[in-house]
Amino acid sequence: MRVTIFGTGYVGLVTGTCLAEVGNDVVCVDVDANKIARLERGEVPIYEPGLEPLVRANHASGHLKFTTDAAAAIEHGQIVFIAVGTPPDEDGSADLSHVLTVARTIGRTLSRYTVVVNKSTVPVGTADAVRAAISAELSARSSEVGFDVVSNPEFLKEGDAVQDCLRPDRIVVGAESAHAVDLLKALYAPFNRNHERIVLMDVRSAELTKYAANAMLATKISFMNEIANIAEQVGADVEQVRRGIGSDPRIGYHFIYPGAGYGGSCFPKDVKALEYAARAHAYEPRLLSAVEAVNAAQKRRLFALIQRHFGESLAGRTIALWGLAFKPNTDDMREAPSRTLLEQLWAAGATVRAYDPEAAAETRRLYGARKDLILCDQQYAALEGADALVVVTEWKAFRSPDFERLHALLKERVIFDGRNIFEPKVVEAAGLAYYGIGRGRSVRAAGGVAT
Ligand SMILES: NC(=O)c1ccc[n+]([C@@H]2O[C@H](COP(=O)([O-])OP(=O)(O)OC[C@H]3O[C@@H](n4cnc5c(N)ncnc54)[C@H](O)[C@@H]3O)[C@@H](O)[C@H]2O)c1
Ligand SMILES: O=c1ccn([C@@H]2O[C@H](COP(=O)(O)OP(=O)(O)O[C@H]3O[C@H](CO)[C@@H](O)[C@H](O)[C@H]3O)[C@@H](O)[C@H]2O)c(=O)[nH]1
């Protein structure tokens, strides 16, 4: 099939590449000429495991093309995907300007029946707005070309994006047109072989399904962070509690890891956008507000533990950070808990020595050169001259460190484990003080309950 994808970010590039991989002819279009030039040279602008070789192979075979020429791209596609950003506006609502710009471009160019598929995360009613924007442009040039608008939200996770796209656990399709449904079924057939993954529904329900999924996952995390904070106060270990509740299949082991708070480009913005939409429809979303408030406080938790350990002033202290990306296997720093911690540490006068396997360049782009940030290219180099180690992102390489080396390098011999990846007893046996998230017993042993 001939497919066009607007937007070559995480969603557009991964979707386009996976569709090309199964034999479709895909044209990816972006307004960012620099990004397109890099992709043309075989450079993938994001770190996403497994993506670069697939992009290169499909580009070389001619199945995957990149362009800034929107009109030519629209001409190409039987199916045109919209996969552009929907960032939060100042009031928390989803900014639909990129989506609607693409819709207008489609309306100005369309010359034959096309199925327009919205993959961006958008509030309920956006498909109607996209349809209206295309229709207005078609009427302006007295064109009667037919088209359908379908909602097909994306559920891929950064760091696992290629696998999620090649092996989706569900493909939500919200459509009113039987012809559009048939076309999408045919397009997704290679990803839908072992059992039926397509969940068909009406357009508005599909739009809401995306927000419901992210809000549910964010709720699980905030719930668990709340339990962790209670565990800390009452002297229980949330890791034992996590295993105790996860074994109940109604609860499950997924997405109940407490930590430094959820970040990334999706959960924070999507919870806010759903809250905004609820209020716009005269419903007060009390649970969503609490999910967000718990998360905002959780992002400040590590700093509270560090400050309590060192006393009021951190001026002159050097803190080593392992992990800057919002989660492992990505270089994405959007809404990363590390950013809250960095900014709090700097405001308190501390210097940070940080190591992340992939996010150093992004950190440099965000913060520029500053003398209270030293980006190290090796995980133990971050510890040189540092008072304490803070684990912010649970990269695999951090899971089994050489604790004797940590003991030798750290001046104050204390570890703040923001992802609970270490066993407190093992750390303490190596002569280091241990603070985790919600691990009350060791918090007490190390000098008091944190508030
Ligand atoms: N990142 C994820 O893991 C993820 C997963 C599921 C859904 N989503 C949703 O998918 C959408 C895209 O997210 P993303 O992370 O891929 O965004 P992104 O910011 O990585 O990429 C968006 C791309 O769209 C391009 N763009 C903007 N306006 C354009 C236009 N008029 N024409 C062509 N290109 C244009 C930008 O230049 C950019 O390259 C968002 O709504 C997001 O919420 C993201
Ligand atoms: O038990 C957990 C699981 C995750 N997180 C944090 O939650 C955030 C988001 O993680 P994850 O969901 O793995 O990454 P995303 O790439 O943001 O993916 C989410 O957001 C995407 C964009 O909408 C959706 O498509 C995905 O289904 C959804 O998982 C990260 O900061 C994680 O550290 C926790 O704190 N505890």
Image (cartoon, rainbow, N blue to C red):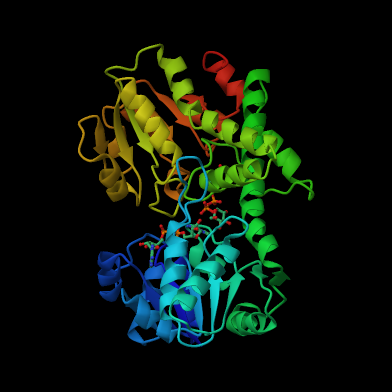
Vertical comparison of 409 with 28: above or below: above
What residue appears at the point 52 percent right and 38 percent down from the top-left corner?
419
What residue appears at the point 20 percent right and 38 percent down from the top-left corner?
369
Q: Is residue 127 left or right of residue 384?
A: right
**Camera sees residue 435:** yes
Decide which of 307, 275 is in the foreground and name it: 275
Decide which of 405, 87 is in the foreground and name it: 87
Tell me the quarter of the picture where residue 199 sits: bottom right
Q: Is residue 364 left or right of residue 242?
A: left
Vertical comparison of 343 with 93: above or below: above
Residue 73: image location, x then y, percent = 38, 80
Vertical comparison of 235 with 359: above or below: above
Decide which of 281, 272 is in the foreground and name it: 281
**Camera sees residue 392:** no
Residue 45: image location, x then y, percent = 32, 63
Residue at far top of view? 312
Residue 400: image location, x then y, percent = 46, 43
What residue appears at the point 51 percent right and 26 percent down from the top-left corner?
435
Q: Is residue 250 left or right of residue 288?
A: right
User: Where, quadrant-wise, is the C terminus in this rendering?
Assistant: top right
Decide which of 400, 16 is in the foreground and name it: 16
Residue 260: image location, x then y, percent = 51, 35
Q: How many marks?
A: 0
